[in-house]
Amino acid sequence: MPQWQAKHLAHRACPDAPLGYMHCDVLIESKTGAGPNVEGLTPANFEARYNLPSTKDGAGQVVAIVDAFDNPNAATDLAAYRTEFGLGKANFTKYNQLGQTKNYPQGSSGWGVEEDLDIEMVSASCPKCTIYLIESDDNSGTNLYDAEIEAVKLGAGIVSNSWGGGAGSSSGGAFATKGITYLASAGDGGYGMQDPADYQTVVSVGGTFLNVSSGSKFIETVWPDSGGGCSVVNKPSWQHDKGCTLRTGNDVSAVAWNAAEYDTYGNSGWFTVGGTSVSSPLVAGMFALAGNSKSEYGGEKLWKLKKDELRKDFHYIKDGELGGCPTSLQGTYLCDAGTKQFGQYSGPSGWGTPNGIAGL
């Protein structure tokens, strides 16, 4: 059982999904509400920790969010978030899975929380980005994957997905378009990987705790409920670690706890959320700041960086471990940060969290 569940720290916004369907990964934290003064981590915290050029780069980059069902308040909630943090007016469009700006699917307050979080986190790291929200008819893998394809048809260069399920099922080519940077949340149940984060063409994004001690001083450790480790799908040729003969996750990571969110579709405004649902869209915005989406292929570039580039361009996460690790893997780089068994890499945190955008 993940710690957030065992310790009653949070609850899932979305219900568990049956076979063939996906669950959203956002967790609503159990602490008291965040008004009237906003609590939780803010865009300024992310910009400072990850050394982001958020105020100057990203214009013209299209980041798509793929989610299920409709949030009728998405545009106004996003506007409220951006106003609170001085991010300016959003360049935002909402589509259905056919690419129409009408005939949206039925609503779902749980997935609505996910949608608001995703578009707000892209805004937090890349406020100048163009943001598309593509809403699939429901949370079936079939419809979500159709929405994935539609996002690319609409012109997105980066597509973030904060949901998952399955274990190595066929992607049906939904994540196969060359020159597109696909990202997905690693999951919130500890050791193990989920679709689509485990696909070779997708950047698997793990989660961290981010503690702001004072001013610009940060302490970042593994979030123990992040997904990660050894998957069940074939290993890409560019992964060269020896502890897993299959696809290893994660590729990169970012904060996954205590983020401020604004949502009025099923909630009453400000509250704090967690999960790798925070991490994936936040990193998607960072990729947009870098502007290199056409040359990306999953996590390949990250795995081919030189040691000095990794040290310079990524924060080394040296503390923490994944929950639920098999006994045989406890203490190894697949479960624990800081082992130095494979350089600065660990399953929970990947190659670390971004320090600027040069490594993306």
Image (tube, helix red, strand yellow):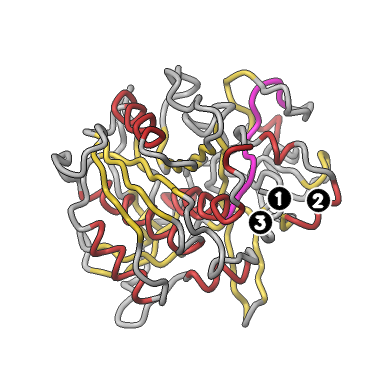
* Residue 108: x %, y % from top left: 20, 45
Identified at 26% across, 69% down, the residue is: 269
**Residue 140 bears which disc, if any?**
none
**Disc 2 and disc 1 in contact, CB within 8 angstroms:** yes
Other-residue count near label 2 (Cα within 10 Å), few / some / many at <14 / 14–19 / ≥20: few
Residue 326 placement (x, y as % from top left): 63, 32
Around disc 1, counting alpha carbons within 10 Å, would you say few (fewer than 14), some (14 to 19), or many (20 or more)? Answer: some
Out of 119 and 166, give the one closest to the viewer. Answer: 119
Q: How many marks?
A: 3
Which residue is the site of mark 3? 357
Earlier in the chain: of badge 2 and badge 1, it is 2
Q: Secondary structure at mark 2?
A: helix
Residue 200, by quadrant, is top right
Residue corresponding to mark 1? 359
The residue drawn where x is 67% and y is 44% is 350
Q: Is residue 243 above or below residue 304?
A: above
Precedes in sequence: disc 3 or disc 2: 2
